[in-house]
Image (tube, rainbow, N blue to C red):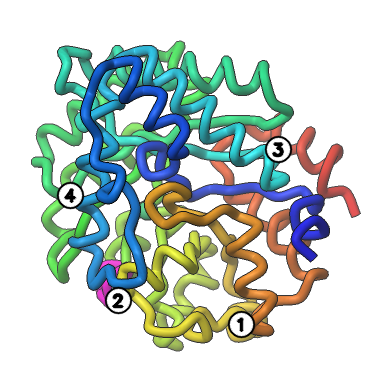
């Protein structure tokens, strides 16, 4: 079964660069840069109680992701894992402001990630694109400054295809960051927003209202019939990340990801890993978990992936090529 799932061409739209680097990458970087890393702190376990606790792992990993080379290598490392999962198109997201500790500028961080994407595409048969994240613990001004770099450097735009806001959330998150989001929209930046990861449906409604074309997680919306209807009519895709949601206690049981209901209501969605390293998962494992719990059939996988490609932020010509090569039937 594992190999069958692996061989089905897939795409992934919600994958964090820092949360997805491999243990081998972290160890190699720690050695190369002479940095002490506490290996016990880089992944969450079943005892993880909340999103806040989960997010602590990133601080440890980020210690080794502060140089140009480490950023280039990190993209290649995650794309290598994606290739192993049978992924043909991936959008990797990262927050440039979390990589400035050793003096890199925001522009240098974004440029390094773009270099990594180019190198990864030359190494693996995977189309790689990047999303730049603003953070919910940073100010609107800081987030807008990050987004502005993309606009000011058109050469980055072939690879940087959209923006996101990541981090913890409360009921007031979206109004608080309306300025950042409105700025992105006003400048035609493709927008996906983390929302509804902690039971806050209001954030999903707000994200849709503010113009998000996709919602990161949005798991709480599955229990809200009206919200599902809104997602359907506004044509907004849910980026579902099952294992991550179990770890952060966004859900108590996998059955809460009611895919049969999403299928019945024709709500667009895709299965993603969120954080391969921190969650200790991969995309094959995510699908296997859903298959084992009868939430999905093997036949559903190509259908879901083909449909989700419509919501990818890559340019239409590449989308057509991907459909022609991998998702024709
Ligand atoms: Zn995420």
Q: Which residues are magenta?
A: 196-203
The residue carrying mark 3 is 319
Q: Nearer the viewer, residue 109 or 101?
A: 101
From the viewer's perspective, tell me whether residue 309 is left or right of residue 217. Answer: right
Residue at 20% over, 61% down: 53
On the question of residue 162 being in view, the answer is no
Does residue 301 show up magenta in the picture?
Answer: no
Residue at 44% over, 27% down: 74
Q: Nearer the viewer, residue 229 or 52?
A: 52
Name which of mark 2 and mark 3 comes first in the sequence: 2
Q: Position of residue 213 (x, y in %)?
A: 46, 53
The residue carrying mark 2 is 201
The residue carrying mark 1 is 265
Name which of mark 1 and mark 2 comes first in the sequence: 2
From the viewer's perspective, tell me whether residue 136 is left or right of residue 184. Answer: left
Judging from the image, what secondary structure is the residue with disc 2 in?
helix
Residue at 52% over, 85% down: 255
On the question of residue 110 being in view, the answer is yes
By secondary structure, the bulk of the magenta-drawn segment is best described as loop
Spatial separation of the CA atoms under disc 2 and disc 3 = 31 Å
Spatial separation of the CA atoms under disc 1 and disc 2 = 18 Å
Judging from the image, what secondary structure is the residue with disc 4 in?
loop
The residue carrying mark 4 is 136
- Badge 2 vs badge 3, beta-carbon distance below 8 Å: no
Does residue 198 show up magenta in the picture?
Answer: yes
Q: Respond yes or no on whether mark 4 lies under 8 Å from ligand 1.
A: no
Label 4 Cα crowd, 10 Å radius (few <14 / some 14-19 / many 20+):
some
Quarter of the image holding residue 35? top left
The vertical placement of 203 against 194, above or below, is below
Spatial separation of the CA atoms under disc 1 and disc 3 = 25 Å
The label nearer to you, 4 versus 1, is: 4
Quarter of the image holding residue 109? top left
């Amino acid at each position: 079964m594992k190999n069958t799932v692996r061989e089905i061409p897939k795409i992934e739209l919600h994958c964090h660069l820092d949360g997805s680097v491999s243990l081998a990458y972290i160890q190699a970087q720690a050695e190369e840069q002479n940095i002490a890393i506490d290996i016990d702190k880089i992944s969450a376990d079943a005892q993880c109680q909340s999103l806040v606790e989960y997010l602590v792992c990133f601080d440890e990993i980020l210690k080794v992701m502060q140089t140009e080379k480490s950023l280039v290598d990190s993209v290649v490392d995650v794309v290598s894992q994606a290739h192993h999962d049978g992924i043909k198109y991936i959008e990797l997201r990262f927050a440039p402001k979390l990589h400035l500790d050793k003096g890199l500028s925001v522009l240098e961080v974004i440029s390094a990630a773009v270099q990594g994407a180019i190198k990864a595409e030359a190494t693996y048969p995977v189309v790689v694109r990047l999303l730049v994240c603003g953070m919910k613990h940073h100010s609107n001004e800081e987030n807008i400054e990050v987004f502005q770099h993309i606009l000011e450097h058109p050469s980055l735009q072939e690879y940087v295809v959209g923006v996101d806001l990541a981090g913890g959330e409360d009921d007031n998150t979206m109004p608080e960051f309306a300025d950042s989001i409105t700025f992105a929209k006003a400048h035609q930046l493709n927008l996906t927003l983390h929302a509804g990861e902690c039971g806050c449906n209001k954030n999903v409604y707000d994200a849709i209202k503010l113009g998000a074309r996709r919602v990161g997680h949005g798991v709480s919306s599955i229990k809200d019939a009206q919200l599902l209807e809104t997602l359907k009519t506004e044509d907004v895709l849910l980026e579902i990340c099952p294992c991550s949601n179990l770890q952060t206690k966004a859900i108590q049981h996998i059955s809460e990801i009611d895919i049969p209901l999403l299928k019945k209501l024709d709500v667009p969605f895709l299965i993603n890993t969120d954080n391969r390293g921190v969650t200790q998962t991969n995309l094959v494992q995510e699908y296997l978990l859903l298959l084992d719990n009868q939430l999905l059939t093997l036949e559903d996988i190509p259908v879901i992936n083909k449909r989700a490609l419509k919501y990818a932020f890559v340019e239409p010509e590449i989308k057509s090529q991907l459909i022609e090569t991998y998702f024709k039937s």
